[in-house]
Amino acid sequence: MTYKTSGVCSREISFEIDEKTDTVSALHFMGGCSGNAGGLSRLVIGMTVDDVIRKLEGVPCGSRPTSCPDQLAKALKEWRS
């Protein structure tokens, strides 16, 4: 799935979910800080969708009310619905 982000430096997030295990199997951020996006991607691969949402939802970026981690949580919630 591809998710268009809002309010952050990255433009979109693409990800794949292993539906048998409900885990993130692939994740890529387009744009934004490559180090943080790459690190975040490595951390969440293999985590369940619910764990990622629970840990990342609501994380701000400086004075912004959202962040790339928060946008990932939003993307996963949208995928879930």
Image (spheres, grey):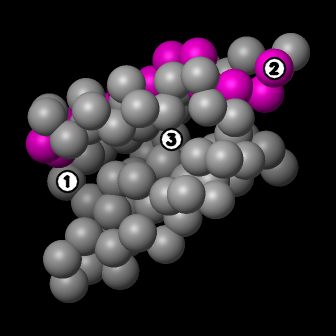
Q: Position of residue 34 (x, y in %)?
A: 14, 33
**Residue at horizontal 73%, vertical 47%?**
50
Left or right: 24 in relation to 66:
right
Nearer the camera: disc 3 or disc 2: 2
Query: Which residue is tagged 1?
Result: 9
Percent across and percent down for residue 56 are 50, 58
Give 8 or 35, whichever is nearer the viewer: 35
22 magenta-colored: yes
Q: Distance between the residues labelled 3 and 1?
A: 14 Å
Q: Quadrant of the N terminus?
A: top right
Numbered-mark total: 3
Please identify the quarter of the rendering in which residue 18 is found.
top right
User: Considering only vertical position in the picture, is 77 above or below 44?
Assistant: below
Residue to which mark 2 is pinned:
21
Type of amino acid under label 1? Cys
Is residue 14 visible to the viewer in this orientation of the structure?
A: no
Name the element at disc 1.
loop
Start and end of the magenta stretch? 21-33
Across and down, in percent, residue 74 comes to: 57, 57
Circle 3 residue: 3
Sequence-first tag of 2 and 1: 1
* Helix, strand or loop under label 3: strand
Decide if residue 65 is in sight here.
Answer: yes
Residue at (45%, 25%) from the top-left corner? 27
10 is higher (above) or lower (below) than 28: below
Mark 3: give few (<14), some (14-19) or many (20+) Cα within 10 Å.
some
Q: How crowded is mark 2: few (under 14 residues within 10 Å), some or many (20 or more)?
A: few
As drawn, the residue found furthest toward the bottom would be 63
In what element is the residue under mark 2?
A: loop
Q: In this view, does 4 lie to the left or right of 30?
A: right
**Is 1 in the magenta?**
no
Alpha carbons under labels 2 and 1: distance apart: 31 Å
